[in-house]
Amino acid sequence: MSNVDLEALRSRVDEINVEILQLINERAGVVKEIGRVKEKQGVNRYDPLRERHMLDHLKENNDGPLPQSTVEHIFKEIFKTALELQVDDQKKALLV
Amino acid sequence: MSNVDLEALRSRVDEINVEILQLINERAGVVKEIGRVKEKQGVNRYDPLRERHMLDHLKENNDGPLPQSTVEHIFKEIFKTALELQVDDQKKALLV
């Protein structure tokens, strides 16, 4: 295999990176929206049971090569950051 | 906004989760392939400069709402796990 093939593989990684980026941003937008709905309903934003269900659903859908433990680890990071964004949003609202 | 809307938003999050899952698995597969090519070429697998370029490229493409620091954090986790998979792969090859 040549450097040309290596470059092609790297280009594919770059494309996938941007696709993941768009999806985690879209996800953060939807989670913010969920936060607004829950706030109106006076419900607590953080829902560990919902997080558990999402992780179970992901593991059922995981065909690898990433092991379940890695999938769980990456998604916990994604969940956490989306939640932090909700909190930031709430702080800004309080400052207005 | 009603519970029906909340359910619709949650369904969208579940869909996005699975799309992200498929992409991080596809990414891990391509990174494994890159590892094999580099091994044949006798090149070191871990390339901090390439990692830096990927992060710069992602930041250029980040339209939010996630802040750059969060994007960098999530992708460093994704990079790390794909690299760990390469190492596991190498260990298995050594055991055969």
Image (tube, coloured by chain):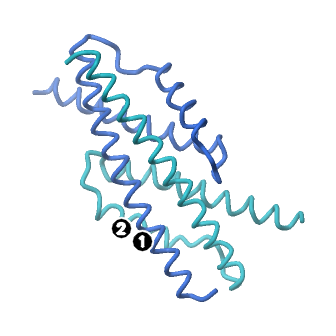
Chain colours: A blue, B cyan
Q: Quadrant of residue B5?
A: top left
Which residue appears at 56% of the width and 87% of the height? A3
Closer to the camera in the image, B34 or B1: B1
* Chain for numbered disc 2: B
Amino acid type of the residue that numbered disc 2 sits on in the rendered structure: His
Q: Are marks 1 and 2 in contact (CB under 8 Å)?
A: yes
Position in image of residue A23 (x %, y %)? 36, 49
Q: Could you tell me how many numbered marks the image carries?
A: 2
Q: Secondary structure at mark 1?
A: helix
- Is B23 placed left or right of B71 in the picture? right
Amino acid type of the residue that numbered disc 1 sits on in the rendered structure: His
Residue that numbered label 2 is attached to: B57
Which residue appears at 29% of the width and 26% of the height? A34
- Is B2 placed left or right of A95 in the picture? right
- The vertical placement of A93 against A68, above or below, is above
Q: Residues within 10 Å of mark 2 (few under 14, many from 20)?
A: some
- The vertical placement of B15 against B61, above or below, is above
Residue that numbered label 1 is attached to: B53
Which residue appears at 43% of the width and 19% of the height? A47
